[in-house]
Amino acid sequence: MTRITVAKGDGIGPEIMDATLEIIKAAGAQLEIDEIEVGEKVYLSGNTSGIAPESWDIIRKNKVFLKAPITTPQGGGYKSLNVTTRKFLGLYSNVRPCMSLHPFVETKHPKMDIVIIRENEEDLYAGIEHQQTDEVVQCLKLISRPGCEKIIRYAFEYAKVYGRKKVTCFTKDNIMKQTDGLFHQVFDEIAAEYPEIENEHWIIDIGAAKMADTPEVFDVIVTLNLYGDVLSDVAAQIAGSVGLAGSANIGEECAMFEAIHGSAPRRAGQNVANPSGLLEGAVMMLNHIGQTEIAEKVQNAWLKTIEDGIHTYDIYKEGVSKQKVGTKEFAQAVIANLGQKPKLLKQVSYAKDAVLSLPKYEKKPAKNKELVGVDLFVHWNGTDPNELATKLESLNTENKNLMMITNRGIKVWPDGFKETYCTDHWRCRFKPTNGKLLHQNEIINLLSKALDAKIDVIKTENLYEFDGKPGYSLGQGQ
């Protein structure tokens, strides 16, 4: 018997949660349930996070959270409960299976059967943004080695446990050589530990186009947070319907399971909503807690129901579907099919008590870190980089010189093009002369001289080498 936390959510949430729980209980799921309230009512009570402190305590105690969709009120100040939950509980892995149900659910991709494993905590979703000049805002992209190792190892372990043959990595490391480059590097390192599983890497733009056109060539896809967010919704839609997809969010201690669709308040209380997405999340939950026989029974019964043409309004189609049913009636049809298996759709078979082997991350030995320069970011309203360079060269000393100025990542001095459009946000690189190292106090002196020269330095970035390799971008146009 496993104790779990359940939140029925908003809109269609209570209806599809009731249907889901009825199905898995009828299948024999051994569960004890603690119900909490999250979402709109909690938000409107004055709690900007949408969840009460005592509810956090229950989730953390039980470790397993089955959540229906919620409604976030319109207006500013309300935090995304999904993002908050993923970060607070360390739910680093978002798992979204996307399988076509051809010919019973319309799709242009009848052979599609992929799993997208998305990093869940880092990347641009750190939400660290600044405006420091009139014309430019910035968002900090954070990628860590622990984050890369955990999600990539999860992808390979998932493939191993569920009999998948290939893991594909999607990045944009031809442009973001440090951040996406680290993800690709770690992918290659970990892939070498799984020689029995095929591995490959695609640049995200052409890879996404290939997935949308020929998804059957992919099996398991692992990628960074933003790319995974976009890809998983595209994959769910081209498989047949976003409303059919479930999602697992897995951490080292806790896990959350849900549908990927929203709360659809306009459909609430009408007994029309399709519970399939949340049911798919519940199947992943049952596998996670080791009740694999129940998960297998529920999944096959659901596939049999789809195959029988018993469909809710969202997937009902004349000539294919046989009966249009409501939420409750769909649940009863799945329950009636428990113990049966589909004949045309692919039956599922889960290894008994399959558990992913996921060791906790261990810190690596520190590298030799040397300070080799500094980038001063300057707010300046002029347009001629040569004029700015003249101002900045007054800061030169016998130990350090201005080496380069870039604007929006493009080198504009020295030897820039007059055609390059420049904003008011300039990156100005100073490095030691004769290949010497830079000292922290020299940066302080540089900033002091800039202040005296009335140069508006809005931030600095130290330039380091790690074991002799640059830990910074060189700048386009070099």
Image (tube, helix red, strand yellow):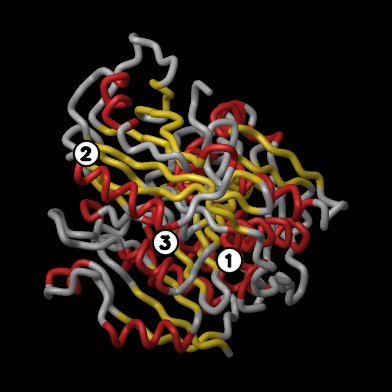
- According to the picture, the residue beneath numbered tag 3 turns out to be 329
Which residue is pictured at 44% across the width and 42% down the height? Answer: 315
Kind of residue indicated by mark 3: Glu
Q: Nearer the viewer, residue 362 or 35?
A: 362
Kind of residue indicated by mark 1: Met
* Residue 456 visible at all: yes
Give the SS element for disc 1.
helix
- Mark nearer the N terminus (1 vs 2): 1
- Mark nearer the N terminus (1 vs 3): 1
List x then y, in percent, for residue 406: 39, 28
Q: Is residue 223 above or below residue 1?
A: above
Q: Is residue 363 above or below residue 314?
A: below
Which residue is pictured at 32% across the width and 40% down the height? Answer: 377
Q: Nearer the viewer, residue 436 or 52?
A: 436
Which residue is pictured at 33% across the width and 72% down the height? Answer: 8
- According to the picture, the residue beneath numbered tag 2 turns out to be 455
Which residue is pictured at 59% across the width and 73% down the height? Answer: 286
Cα gap from disc 1 to disc 3, whole angstroms: 23 Å
Q: Nearer the viewer, residue 448 or 77?
A: 448
- According to the picture, the residue beneath numbered tag 1 turns out to be 284
Among the 4 quarters of the image, the one containing residue 271: bottom left
Cα gap from disc 3 to disc 2, whole angstroms: 70 Å
Kind of residue indicated by mark 2: Ile
Image quarter of the N terminus: bottom right
Give the SS element for disc 3.
helix
List x then y, in percent, for residue 40: 20, 67
Q: Nearer the viewer, mark 1 or mark 2?
A: 2
List x then y, in percent, for residue 298: 60, 67
